[in-house]
Image: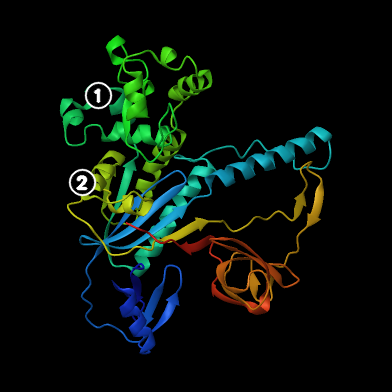
Amino acid sequence: MSNFVFVLDANKQNQDPVPPGQARRLLSQGKAAVYRHYPFTIILKYAVQEPHTQPCQIKIDPGAKVTGLAVVQGDKVIWGAQLVHRGEQIKNDLLKRRAIRRSRRNRKTRYRKPRFLNRTRKPGWLPPSLESRVENIVSWVNRIRRYVPTAGLSQELVKFDTQAMQNPEISGISYQQGELAGYEVRQYLLEKWGRKCAYCGAENTRLEVEHIHPKSKGGSSRVSNLTIACRNCNQDKGDRDIKDFLAQKPDVLSRILKQARLPLKDAASVNSTSWALFHQLKQTGLPVETGTGGRTKYNRFRLGIPKTHWLDAACVGEVEKLKVLTSQPLLITAKGWGNRQMCTPNKYGFPSKHRTRCKTFKGFQTGDMARAVLPTGKFAGTHVGRLIVRESGVFEMITAKGKISPVRHKYCRSIHRNDGYMYAFSSFVS
């Protein structure tokens, strides 16, 4: 089943989301019209005098690359989405721009002089690559709130409680031996080692926590001395030193010893943005519930729910039971609004082509979501995706399945104007 459909009345007051079948009947009977395609929202042609709405909870599972979003009404998951961030792209673009400027200064050609009076940073400053993640999430929370009666927000505040893992005594023995015992550490190790055996690379099998330096020979239980291994490798290694166990595999030994000392980059970025996100969510005026990644995983295992980003979001915080009523989450990819660079340089920093000031051609602009019905050619058929426009009227389209080219403007119909994101749907199999 698809996501529930958001509903507004004639006064644009949000109502309870309805199942897709009910929305289809309202549209076919002429009682409603399509208000927005992403997220799909309909608007009633009459005002609801005394609405009886059941408030929903918007739940968020922030991630370094992908953030899960879920709308939970009571104990029912009625809407889900996965938001793909563009932090790495922003970082790479800034590095590329810096390299071009420096090369021009070294060659003593025309350039913008370095400025040293604009280096002050406001309190709580974040790098642009991290700030974009926070802004993307806040934008979508505010967008959902416009269409859904919302009672509160739930956020996974910290991915891992690294302080408690490194120093178990910090919160007392009850923290380590309670119902969450092992979940924080195990989740951290799964993320750090790529969810596969560190010794043989086996995937999609049961993985066990393994001490790199055996505990029987003085090895500690700090996360820097832990890895994950399949049962066979764990049994074969036993209490042997890792150097003896991998004496015939020096490359694997070097990789494990190096990776064991490295912090988890994605977890660090999530932890560094979590509080900034929390403070911005508090400014909405709604109560914000928080939980840890260990609690989320515990809830998911207890309820027997598969691991996906949007279902992880549904399991954030205090959860007694959940009933998943949707199986097709919305896939949202942050694309940005383009850039203001009028001259495109080649790899050496020399100008290669210039852009026109006009951004709209044949009624379309880059970033518009459109439906194209191509009558002939290699890609004949109906396609939905994000347009890349050209002055000639021969466009390209980026879809969930890849690039479609050429796409002539006369075969396109706009369904969603550019808002900085690309949309698609994913079928979920439980």
Q: Where 122 sits versus 254, above or below? A: below
User: Residue extending furthest top?
Assistant: 217
Q: Tell me the quarter of the picture where residue 79 sits.
A: bottom left
In the displayed structure image, the side of residue 411 where residue 141 appears, left or right: left
Say whether residue 418 is visible: yes
Locate residue 330, reporting x and y percent. 42, 62
Q: Do the residues labelled 2 and 1 touch (CB within 8 Å)?
A: no
Locate residue 426, reporting x and y percent. 43, 61
Q: Residue at x 46, y 34 (%)?
A: 265
Q: Where 285 sits versus 117, above or below? A: below
In the displayed structure image, the side of residue 232 where residue 128 appears, left or right: right
Locate residue 221, reporting x and y percent. 30, 20
Q: Which residue is drawn at 45% across and 74% down?
A: 36
- For label 1, the residue is 168
Judge by depth and name the residue closer to the eye, 306 or 106.
306
User: Residue 6 bears which disc, if any?
Assistant: none
- For label 2, the residue is 302
